[in-house]
């Protein structure tokens, strides 16, 4: 068993994959590399967020700069770790690393062994690991070990375990933060999700009233890539429990079409098309809560010990 497997991975949190996206010389190959980083993160027990799947400057060229900032900033600040590829100089990566520092998110830098790294970047207090690699196998081993090390910071020999009363306070605070997102980010997410009109109003109202966690909307749009009628039908029917007639009226389709969109959305998020209400409810509770909330729950339930 290698070192990466022996250590406990970060559980139930999001890894933000940071890398240059603007004016890439070989965009397909670079984005494929980012997908590899995401795969390594997911093997370590994390959920990966890849900006090029949501706010890509080419694929999502219709998004205005402020919307891109609000969406990606939300993911950086709620991540449990940021993996930054430093092989291509990028203003965006530098901004994301600094956002991570401001919000206490640890940063792991990844770069080819023969490439130099800015000393300013290396000196950022958020940087906890630097992974230099010569090939993909070496990258998988080294990054896996680095993520395991970041995930074991509360174990013996690492940072002191935070007192449970502090953890409870952070837990409550994270619930509130997860429940509400800045209105600019909600608006940007709705734009990315391609919903408008009555459906968009219902979703925005659900976030403001706490019926739908803002972080849950972020996951539906970013992680699960729900769009248009699929996103609208899923939220209206499974989250807000609107009747078929109400959902159909909001979406401007017939009830049979609503059922089809709900089934498609359920499959996309990992549910069965005909999932029972109890199964859907359980999924909503366990999957649409912000990553920091889940991480704090894990801390509380394990008595402050990683498992």
Image: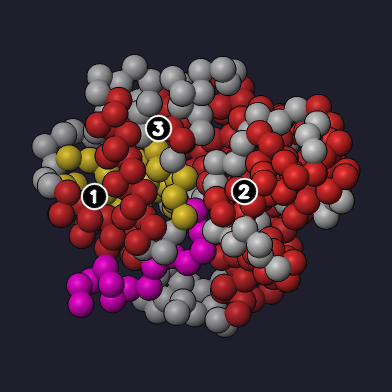
Say few, some or many: other residues with alpha carbon within 10 Å of mark 1 (under 14 / 14 to 19 / 20 or more): many
Closer to the camera in the image, 22 or 154: 22
Query: Toward the viewer: 225 or 46?
Result: 225
Instruction: Estimate the spatial distance between the alpha carbons at disc 1 and disc 3, rounded to whole Å.
Output: 16 Å
Lower sequence index among marks 2 and 1: 1
Real-space CA distance between mark 2 and mark 3, rounded to the nearest whole angstrom? 32 Å
Q: Residue at x 56, y 65 (%)?
A: 295
Q: Residue at x 29, y 46 (%)?
A: 36
Disc 3: CA contacts within 10 A as few (<14), some (14-19) or many (>=20): many
Query: Badge 3 is on which residue?
Result: 93
Is 129 drawn above or below residue 124 in the view shown? Answer: below
- Residue 51, given in percent of the width and then of the height, sits at 46, 35
Q: Which residue is mark 1?
A: 131
N-term mark: 2 or 3 = 3
Secondary structure under the numbered disc 1 in the rendered image: strand
Q: Residue at x 30, y 25 (%)?
A: 27
For the question of whether residue 118 can be seen, the reply is no
Query: Residue 113 falls in which quadrant of the image?
Result: top left
| Span highlighted in magenta in the image | 1-14
Residue extending farthest bottom: 303
Image coordinates of residue 2 in percent, x first then y, are 20, 72
Residue under pointer 2: 265
Relative to 52, does residue 275 appear above or below in the rendering?
Answer: below
């Amino acid at each position: 068993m290698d070192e990466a497997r022996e250590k406990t991975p970060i559980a139930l949190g999001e890894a933000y994959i940071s890398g240059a996206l603007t004016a890439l010389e070989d965009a397909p190959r670079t984005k494929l590399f980012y997908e590899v980083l995401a795969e390594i993160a997911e093997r370590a027990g994390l959920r990966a967020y890849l900006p090029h799947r949501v706010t890509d400057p080419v694929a999502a060229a219709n998004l205005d700069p402020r919307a891109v900032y609000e969406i990606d900033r939300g993911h950086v600040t709620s991540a449990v770790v940021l993996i930054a590829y430093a092989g291509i100089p990028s203003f965006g990566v530098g901004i994301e690393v600094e956002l991570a520092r401001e919000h206490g998110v640890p940063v792991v830098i990844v770069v080819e062994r023969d490439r130099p790294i800015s000393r300013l970047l290396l000196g950022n207090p958020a940087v906890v690991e630097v992974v230099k690699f010569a090939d993909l196998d070496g990258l998988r081993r080294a990054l896996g070990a680095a993520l395991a090390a970041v995930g074991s910071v509360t174990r013996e020999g690492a940072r002191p375990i935070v007192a449970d009363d502090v953890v409870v306070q952070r837990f409550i605070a994270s619930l509130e933060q997860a429940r509400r997102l800045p209105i600019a980010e909600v608006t940007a997410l709705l734009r990315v999700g391609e919903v408008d009109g009555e459906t968009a109003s219902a979703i925005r109202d659900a976030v403001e009233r706490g019926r739908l966690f803002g972080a849950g909307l972020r996951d539906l749009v970013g992680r699960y890539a729900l769009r248009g009628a699929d996103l609208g039908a899923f939220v209206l029917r499974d989250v807000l429990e609107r009747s078929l007639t109400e959902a159909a009226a909001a979406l401007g389709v017939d009830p049979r079409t609503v059922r089809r969109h709900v089934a498609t959305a359920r499959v996309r998020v990992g549910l069965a098309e005909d999932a029972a209400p109890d199964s859907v409810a359980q999924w909503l509770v366990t999957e649409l809560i912000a990553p920091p909330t889940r991480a704090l729950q894990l801390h509380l339930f394990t008595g402050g010990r990683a498992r």
